Image: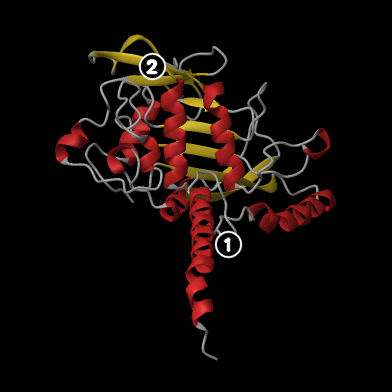
Amino acid sequence: MPLNRRAMKSFPSLFCPLIVVTVSLILLQSEAARQAFRRDPGHPQWHHGAFQDVKDSIRSDVRSMLHSRAEVPFQAPLEVNIVLIGLNGDGGYRYTLDSHKLEEFLRVSFPSHRPSCLETGEPLDIEHHIVYNAFPAGQAELIALEKALKEAMVATGTAREADFGREVPLFEVDATAVEPVFQRLYSYVFDMENGGYSAAEMDRPVPSAIFIVNFDKVRMDPRNKDIDLESLMYGRIAQLTEEEMKKQEGEYIYRYRYNGGGASQVWLGSGRFVVIDLSAGPCTYGKIETEEGSVSSKTLPRLRNLLFPRGAVACW
C-alpha cells in the first residue's frame, strides 16, 4: 500500500534517531568486547577437562591398590597446565612456540615422576603419570600484563647484563603488585571469574598452572612514555627488522621480588600458579645441588637460549 506524502515526510525524523541509537549500542558493545580477560557469549574457550578425564581412573586405581598390597608404587595421574604468554609471534623476538609440539615434547621427555621422602631420600610408594596441557594466551592478555608490569617497575640503580657484561639500568617489580593481573588471567583461562574460594571449597579439584612469559622488553620499557600499549591490545603487532631484533633486550634489566624476597625471574603466586618470566633477569639464585642435577643463575637464560636460539624467529 503506498504511503501518503505526509507519512513519507515524517519518516526521516522517526528513522534517523533509531539509526543513531542502534549504531551507538553496536559501538558500545564493540568497545566492551575490546577488553582483556573478557569472555563474550560464544567465545571459544579452552576447557579444563583433563581432571575429569582421569578422575574415574583415579578411583579405579585406588580401589585396586586397596585390594592388592603388591602393587607398588601406586599409579596416580598428575595434571600440568602450561600457559604460553607472548609466544605466538607477539612477544619478545616474535618467538613462536607450537603448544601441541610442546605437549608432545614434555610427554616424551618427562612422562612420569616419583617423589622422594624429604628426610630420607627414599622414593615414596606413589608414581605420577603426568598429563600435559599447553595452550597460548591471547594478544590482549599479553599487552594487559605488559602494561601492568611497566607501571610497576621501579628504578633501583644498575646491574650487569651477565657475569662480565656491561652495566645497564635496573628495575625491580613487586610481584604482589602485578599478581592480581596474573590472577585475572588465571580466572579467565580456567573460566573461574570469581577468582576465590571459600574455606569449604578449597578441597575441590581446581587447576594449577605454569605461566611461561616472553615479554617484549622494548615495548614495555618504563623509560619510554611514547609507546601506547592500549592501541596494541587489538592492533597489529609488526614483525621485527634485523636491526630491531638486535635491540630486543632493551638495554635494561628487570626482576621480581615477592614480599621483599630475593630478586628472581620465577615466583610462586598465592593462588594456583607459578610465573616463569624468560625476559626478566639475569638474576642470582645461588646454586642448588640435587641428585637430578643443579640449578644456578644461568638455568633460565640457558632454557631460553635452548628453546629459542639467538636471532631465531620461530621454533618447533
Q: Quadrant of residue 188?
A: top right
Image coords of residue 110 (percent x, y):
50, 45
Nearer-the-camera pick, 6 or 187: 6
Q: Which residue is mark 2?
A: 171
Question: Where is mark 1, residue-wise?
Answer: 42
What x and y, as percent, mark residue 301? 35, 28
Residue 22 placed where, x, y %? 53, 61
Residue in the picture at 39% in, 26% down: 280
Residues packed near mark 2 inside 10 Å, few (<14), some (14 to 19) or many (20 plus): many
Query: Residue at image x 36%, y 23%?
Result: 298
Q: Residues within 10 Å of mark 1 (few under 14, many from 20)?
A: few
Q: As displayed, is residue 4 above or below residue 62?
A: below
Q: Considering the numbered disc 1 on the image, is that residue within a helix, a strand or a loop?
A: loop
Q: Is residue 213 above or below residue 104?
A: above
Quarter assignment of residue 90: top left
Residue at the (67%, 28%) spot, across then down: 117
98 vs 54, nearest the viewer: 98
Q: Is residue 226 left or right of residue 28?
A: left
Q: Type of residue at label 1?
A: Gly
> Identity of the amino acid at label 2?
Phe
SS for callout 2: strand
The x and y percentages for residue 49 are 64, 55
Sequence order check: which comes first, mark 1 or mark 2? 1
Q: For the N terminus, which image quadrant?
A: bottom right
> Taking 274 as reference, is 83 above or below it?
below
Depth-wise, is mark 1 or mark 2 nearer the camera? 1
